[in-house]
Amino acid sequence: MTPAAEALTVAQNPKSTLPDELQLPWRHLQEVSTRLRQVIRGKDDVIEAVLIALLAEGSVLLEDVPGVGKTTLAKSVSRLIDLEYQRIQCTPDLLPADILGGPIYLQSKGEFEFRPGPVFCNLLVADEVNRASPRTQSALLEAMAESQVTIDGERYDLKHPFMVIATQNPAGFEGTFPLPESQLDRFLFRLSMDYPDTESEIDLLLDQSEAEPVAALQPVMQAEELTLLQTWVRQIRTDRKVAAYVVALAAATRQDSRLRVGCSPRGSKMLMRASQARAVLMGRDFVLPDDVQQLGTAVLAHRVSTRHGTATSNESRQIVASIVDQVPVPV
């Protein structure tokens, strides 16, 4: 059974071995999954990855051509889970203060007052992030890594839960600035939505013939329920053999002759966290080697560098996928 098919089966026939206090939040999460599939047609694997990232407190980079539903997906998630949502359209003249906020002088008071920017929300969508300058791109680094920002020497904690869904145009599009490796490493997943299949696109056209489905979405899950599940993700049981499998995958990327730089220990940590989150999404209180195997490519592919500087993200993905296929899975 494919990962998407497994997730769909769970959503349609919810069964869980999680503790009693998590049963209701978990069922609400399955309802979120089901309704997302009614809006975003034919992209079950992407929907699963975004929900895993939410549970793992990670961020997602969606890379594809404009108009395939990247922003619609993010907006739908925020409506269904009752998250505070902000969107920024990245352009070359966008400044860090346009994202983070900054001090504003109040003439009536004769003093400066801090005005928070769009980053002070639960779900931030950075649309076409690679059109922003490197200076502005870096403004998101601290927010994604530590859920905080530092402005004029003052530290400000962001809201919890917090997640960034960034979209970017494929490399080579006019007016883009490639994201550096240090920033790519902050994203849990780098995904591609791609064009929908024929039947899914027909369904999409019929769904939107009279109105946008997103506008009709109502919350089926509260932010507090998501926070409860996120806290439990870190407590999911992980056998030492599974942890050794994660390390073996990371080590294989460091030894592969096709790669110049392999996966760092941060990548291993993120793969473990994502695997724990997938276990929760599937209603389990333990991690299976299959969780690691299914997520290995999506988590590790953007954390490696090929020996050919001109290699595309798809080539890196193919190399990592072949590594995942070759490393023995523990039984």
Image (cartoon, rainbow, N blue to C red):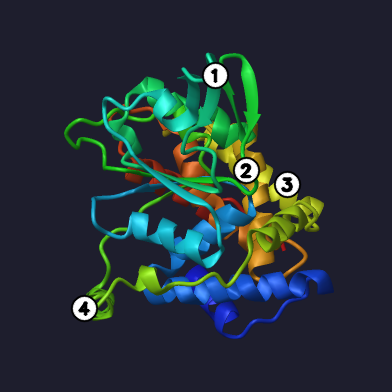
Whole-Å distance between the Cαs marked 4 and 2?
37 Å
Q: Amino acid at mark 1?
A: Lys
Residue at 59% from the left image edge and 74% from the top image edge? 30
Cβ–Cβ under 8 Å for marks 4 and 2: no
Earlier along the polypeptide chain: callout 4 or callout 1?
Answer: 1
Whole-Å distance between the Cαs marked 2 and 1?
28 Å
Earlier along the polypeptide chain: callout 4 or callout 3?
Answer: 4
On the image, the x and y values in percent for residue 85 come to 48, 51
**Toward the viewer: 76 or 324?**
76
- Numbered disc in front, either 2 or 3: 2
Whole-Å distance between the Cαs marked 4 and 3?
51 Å
Q: Amino acid at mark 4?
A: Ser
On the image, the x and y values in percent for residue 66 come to 23, 51
- The circle on residue 244 is 3
- The circle on residue 209 is 4
Earlier along the polypeptide chain: callout 1 or callout 3?
Answer: 1
Residue ID for mark 2: 159
Cβ–Cβ under 8 Å for marks 4 and 3: no
Q: Amino acid at mark 2?
A: Lys
Whole-Å distance between the Cαs marked 2 and 3?
34 Å
On the image, the x and y values in percent for residue 139 come to 47, 26
Give the answer, above or below, for where 168 lies relative to 180: below
Whole-Å distance between the Cαs marked 1 and 3?
60 Å
Say what secondary structure mark 3 lies in.
helix
